Image: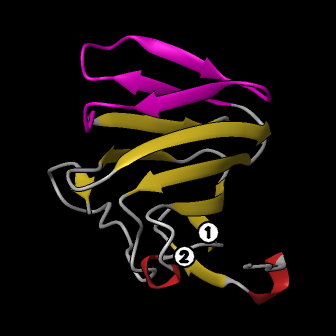
Amino acid sequence: MIVRHVDNVKTMDWGNGISRRFLLSADGMGYTVTDTVVRAGTKSRLEYRNHLEACYCIEGSGEVIDLDGTTHPITPGTLYALDKHDAHYLVASPHEDLRLVCVFTPALNGDEVHRLDQAEFSHY
């Protein structure tokens, strides 16, 4: 059995917020669970080429934007899943952080971060 408290997990600054990584590849579960904070007022160009991801909003607000420009509001109780390695924009509202519980498969190693200053979508 694996039992972890938020105070004792690997925490990474992923680029526009922090990611508390509860389960990693080394745990042998096959997936990662994170508690991710997206800083208020940020916009991130993201793409997971090697992972599928589902995110469930537990706090704050924002939006996820498809490449075709379709905007999906994110508020507590909303889940979005990137089931086709979808490139997207993740935007936190200007007045509050966005907090998500995220699941990645396959599992992350734990030290992955985004490079948000590049011209292409940040990926890992």
Which residue position is annotated with label 1?
18
Amino acid type at image mark 1: Ile
Asked if residue 95 can be seen in this view, the reply is no
Q: Does the segment drawn in magenta span residue 74?
A: yes
- Splitting the image into 4 quarters, where does residue 3 fall? bottom right
In primary-sequence order, the first of circles 1 and 2 is 2
Q: How did the renderer colour the structure?
A: secondary structure
Asked if residue 87 can be seen in this view, the reply is yes
For the N terminus, which image quadrant?
bottom right
Which residue position is annotated with label 2?
13
Q: Does the segment drawn in magenta span residue 60?
A: no
Q: Is residue 70 above or below residue 103?
A: above
In the rendered image, residue 70, in percent from the top left (x then y), is placed at 38, 10
Tell me where the magenta segment starts and ends, as one range. 62-86
Q: What element does badge 2 sit on?
A: strand
**Which residue shows up at 46% across the image and 67% down it?**
15
